[in-house]
Image (cartoon, rainbow, N blue to C red):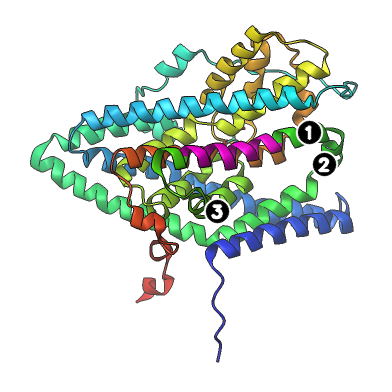
Amino acid sequence: MNTKKPMSLTGRIIFGMIAGILTGFAVRFLFGDEGFVHTYIVNGLFEVGGKIFIASLQMLVVPLVFVSLVCGTSSLKDLSTLGRMGGKTLAFYIVTTAVAITLALTMGTLFQPGAGADLTAAASFQSAEAPSLGQVIINMFPTNPINAMAEGKTLQIIVFAILFGIAISTAGKSGERIASLFVDLNAVIMKLVALLMHIAPFGVFFLMAKLFTGLGLGAIWSLAGYFAVLAGTLLLHGLVTYSVLLKGFTGLSPVTFLKKMEDAIMFAFSTASSNATMPVTMETAKNRLGVDNKVASFTIPLGATVNMDGTAIMQGVATAFIAQAFGIDLTMGDYLAVILTATLASIGTAGVPGVGLIMLAMVLNQVGLPLEGIALIMGVDRLLDMIRTAVNITGDSAVTMIVAKSEGALDESVFNDPKAGEKEEEVHLEKVNA
Ligand code: ASP
């Protein structure tokens, strides 16, 4: 008799991740970086598998944000809730980001990772133009909602979905009919998320195998100080700051919170994209943490777009590192300017891989540091991007918990149930033929 319990989804994702990392190292060690295996397995199978996985996650983002937010807004009894919730969410997002960057600058100044760094390797770096704050705000309003969806502009979709939801809730009988349609659509889309989570162990395997076949670990050696200070600060913020906030504002256990975030954290780590991880963050918030859809459908997409504490931390440590490496002293005024600009830069950073580094140019420009500094740290950015993305989405979820608790929209019995969400995650494909 077979009494073995099947491995949990989380267990399978961890397994996929570790197997992928080991496979990547093994392929690199055994076959180098060219030849048949490289062409057909690494750049063939691994790359195709990984890209399909990310594409299928991204495929869900637009329908998920739109449908769940319309559902959430149309279920609000009173519209003032929306303003209050929005205000609280934004305030927490901005404050946590400012705390993150202050922590980063403190760590960067304390540990001096850039003192004595070798600058000869620096190549040139072309920065992209950062949009002005005014433009960012104007860009939130879509002229054409279909176009906003086609181009995946999350903030524009959020604005349209809120207005649409408000219209539904005030449109009487017609509104009620449309609202019930959206409730059903939402349930179907969440099932789609569950379905995709089941292929995650394979997707994560391909992503890790491809990445670790080509990862330049030599670069990490030469920038070990920067890497260690940045990774340490990210962990400190991810584990301590959020735990203190969560405990302080909700009284709930940070250990349970982090445990329940496991899957979302692994998705963020392997995709390095808050945006692609959004379906899983949302699923976690609703089904595992017990947050009501009316809060999660608003705070999670907003957070994945504007709240990037991990990115802000990278920008803080990188600024301190580059200043030290080029022997430039920063004044107190410069530090304040960095805090302000990095907070804005992280708001303007899209939740996709590597963008944080491009936005760093905006911060360096602000305090007159050479942009070539970015070339210095570029070689180690991918791995750090993975860690900071995990911090980014943990921050979104921690604030979501706090806002939900204060709005009476948190089901603590779900939060405290270690098995919560398992039923929603089940997918029985055999039923398709039944
Ligand atoms: N990859 C990050 C994210 O998606 C953004 C960044 O820092 O580059 O959250």
Magenta stretch prevailing secondary structure? helix
Sequence order check, earlier mark of 2 and 1: 2
Seen in the picture, residue 46 relative to 243 is either above or below; the reply is below
**Which of the two discs, 2 and 3, labels the residue nearer the N terminus?**
2
Residue at image point 67% right, 34% down? 233
Q: Earlier in the sequence, mark 1 or mark 3?
A: 3
Q: Amino acid at mark 3?
A: Glu
| Residue 187 horizontal/vertical position (percent) | 32, 55
Name the residue located 68 percent from the left edge and 18 percent from the top edge.
127
Q: Where is residue 327, by image quadrant? A: top right
Query: Disc 2 marks which amino acid?
Result: Gly
Q: Residues within 10 Å of mark 2 (few under 14, many from 20)?
A: few
> Which residue lies under the disc numbered 3?
262
> Cβ of disc 3 within 8 Å of ligand 1?
no
The stretch of residues the image draws in magenta is 231-245
In the image, which disc is placed on residue 379?
1
The front one of 36 and 342 is: 342
Location of residue 141 with respect to 295 vertically, above or below: above
Q: On the rendering, which quadrant does ligand 1 occupy?
A: top right
* Residue 374 placement, left or right of 298: right
Residues under numbered marks 2 and 1 in contact, where contact means CB atoms less than 8 Å apart? yes
For residue 87, above or below residue 335: below
For label 2, the SS is loop
Identify residue for label 2.
216
For discs 1 and 3, the disc positioned in front in the rendered view: 3
Can residue 391 be seen in the rendering of this structure? Answer: no
In what element is the residue under mark 3?
helix
Q: CA distance from mark 1 to mark 3?
A: 27 Å
Per the model, the C-alpha gap separating discs 2 and 1 is 7 Å
